[in-house]
Amino acid sequence: MAKLLYGTTCTQLRKIAFEYAEANNIANKFDKSSRLAGKDWLTLFLKRNPSISMGKPEATSINRIQAFNEEEVNTYFKNLEHVFEKYKFKERRVFNVDETGINTVQKPERILALKGVKLMGEATSWERGENVTVICCFSTAGTYIPPMFIFHRKRMSYLLSKGGLVGTIYGCSVNGWSNESLFFKWIQHFLNIVKSTIDYPVLLILDNHSSHISLEIFEFCKKRSIVMVTIPPHTSHKPQPLDVPFFSSLKSAFCHECDVYMKSQVYQKITPCELAELFNKAYIKVTTLDKGQSGFKAGRICSFNPNKCQHDDLQQFEILRDVVLEDEEVPMQQMEMKWLHLQTSHISPK
């Protein structure tokens, strides 16, 4: 069920254990009023089954489930294979670009407190923070392009770049998101660093965001030997290198830096003017050679093997559509029965 993105919670497992024991007349000391197996049973169950552990899942939308299929993924990797064969890219000339968001309100870290205290608080700057878009890019060789910040305002101020990473560029938009003109500015920034030519082209892998698609950007890249391959819509959570290991580590490090700032600057709020410096401290910690290379390996993208995608990733989504998409409101018990049936009919004993 976890592989199918409909994982079982601890409470659901305790309920299943209780119902199983009752249906099979197995003597037990479970709580009849709550109709749940005890927490001590759950602890011993996990101890008996060390291969099972509790974890926090990543939210995955139905659009991603429907879009991530073998046909779409194979088309993407065929496109990659075609451009690799045509342009003979060097490993260090393959880049991935993507946007992420940071906020003036950090996600609090876990803290120590007295036992029995149910309500624990942590100081943050605001009730609702201000989002800032950051465009990041790295290569298969672990080369990082200095990022671009996009602030939610009409005019840029030099205070917004205070303490920022050397080489970083900045822009503004009415909603704080990227748009065609800002992404074109980033493409020019990218070209100034990679210095692509006809004899030394670069490959840029990116998603299908509307800001990436314009005639001006296409013509600019075509004339300057920047070859672009787009990832199919709603599938970037799997094949996109930046999405897989990098952004999660970056955001964790950024939240840590914000937390340190809040503790060292008592009653001082984090404003957009502090974001560049805090982001810089987090960015230099996570932009390692290993992190960049592992991102492309996790996305199954490399110059010597561009058309491979892990079969298990596709299989779990293909089976999930068979289970769920026949009826958008399938009850949990019916879903489990369908899954058990499909498990025997679709999956080999191995």
Image (cartoon, rainbow, N blue to C red):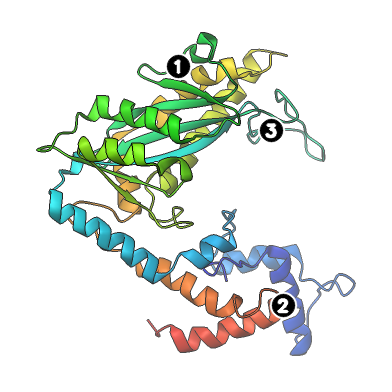
Question: Residue drawn 59% across and 76% down?
Answer: 325
Whichever of labels 3 and 1 marks the residue nearer the N terminus, that label is: 3
Outermost residue, left side: 199
**Taking 9 as reference, is 138 left or right?**
left
Whether residue 319 can be seen here? yes
Give coordinates of residue 59: x percent, y percent: 59, 55
Tell me, yes or no, whether the two marked residues, 2 and 1, touch with CB atoms within 8 Å: no
Q: Kindly identify the amino acid type of the residue bearing the numbered disc 1.
A: Gly
Task: Quickly name the residue at label 2.
Answer: 331
Of tags 3 and 1, the one toward the viewer is 1
Task: Quickly name the residue at label 1.
Answer: 164
Mark 2 to mark 1 CA distance (whole Å):
51 Å
Of tags 2 and 3, the one toward the viewer is 2
Task: Quickly name the residue at label 3.
Answer: 112
Quarter of the image for residue 4 reads bottom right
Secondary structure under tag 1 reads loop
Quarter of the image for residue 204 reads top left
Q: Quadrant of the N terminus?
A: bottom right
Question: Residue drawn 64% across and 68% down?
Answer: 8
